[in-house]
Amino acid sequence: MRWAGGRGSGNIEDRRGMGPAGAVGGLGAGGVILALIGYFVFGIDPSTTTQVLGGQNVQQQEGVRGGPADEAGRFVDVVATNVDDVWKQQMQGYRPPDAVVIYDRATGTGCGMGQSAMGPFYCPADRKVYLDLSFWQELESKFGAGGEAARAYVIAHEIGHHVQNLTGATDTAQRMGMRGADSGAVRLELQADCYAGVWAAHAAAVSGGQVQLDPRDIEDGLRAAAAVGDDTLQRRSQGQVVPDAFTHGSSEQRMRWFRTGVQSGDPAACDTFRAPRL
């Protein structure tokens, strides 16, 4: 994947090396979403996750704002900037996330206490994307999806959740329910996969070729989408597939919707909420 010459916007909040702030209060809706991510994607007991989350009243931290100097941080900055540039072109009035937060271990968020075991996530309450960069190693070693394109897919997927927050799709999904093969949660995740594909389709054009994915990179993105399908993860963690517990969609669905975004380049083709077939 080509990215080193790409533009960074500095919309990064670097909290690496900072300890997590404290949390008080009950578990809010955003915290429930994070707990489900922790359980269904990474096999964490929900009771453990909710204990760590603590609640929505989490003391907020402020990291270093700007463009990181290290390669890993710069990669996030360049890719996130490129994703934002695509959405500025595709969506009238698009506003980027308030920040892409890179952290390690745990950090306070507007949705509760986030921890690295949950993987990357978007918090609609504070409009920030959260990334513990150790997930890149997890993605490769545990899920077999390595390479920079797989990492970029993850960033584009999370910013896709920000787009959904702006369009109201997040609220629609919550009203439909957050578990089950036909749930709002699955529709939301598959749409974010499709949005990641839309980014891949336009990445080179909006950057003048400075950020570019070749066909092999697209395959790496598809491999990453497949690696975190509910059926694949459930077989790995519990030896059986339970569609009633789906929160993200099957591996086949995630690959298909990512490919739909790549091939169409059109956000309108990503309407999983009206699609006759997920």
Image (cartoon, rainbow, N blue to C red):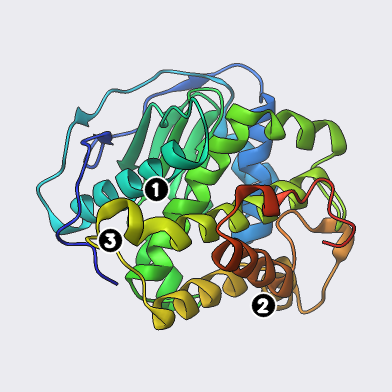
Q: Which residue is mark 2?
A: 236
Circle 1: element type? helix
Circle 3: element type? loop
Spatial CA span between label 1 and label 3: 10 Å
Spatial CA span between label 2 and label 3: 34 Å
Residue drawn 39% across and 41% down?
Answer: 84
State the image coordinates of residue 61 (x, y, percent, origin top left).
Answer: 32, 23
Circle 2: element type? helix
State the image coordinates of residue 113 (x, y, percent, origin top left).
Answer: 49, 32
Q: Nearer the viewer, residue 103 or 152?
A: 152
**Position of 136 compared to 163: left or right?**
left
State the image coordinates of residue 87 (x, y, percent, origin top left).
Answer: 46, 41
Position of residue 11 relative to residue 240, above or below, is: above
Give neighbour class at mark 2: few <14, some 14-19, many 20+ (Cα, 10 Å).
Answer: few
Q: Which residue is mark 3?
A: 211
Q: Nearer the viewer, residue 160 or 238?
A: 160
Q: Which residue is mark 1?
A: 83
Amino acid type at circle 3 is Val
**Quadrant of the image containing the C terminus:** bottom right
Give neighbour class at mark 1: few <14, some 14-19, many 20+ (Cα, 10 Å).
Answer: many
* Residue that protrudes farthest toward the left in the picture: 69
Spatial CA span between label 2 and label 1: 31 Å
Amino acid type at circle 2 is Arg
Q: Quadrant of residue 17?
A: top left
Q: Earlier in the sequence, mark 2 or mark 1?
A: 1
- The answer to whether any part of residue 52 appears in the image is no
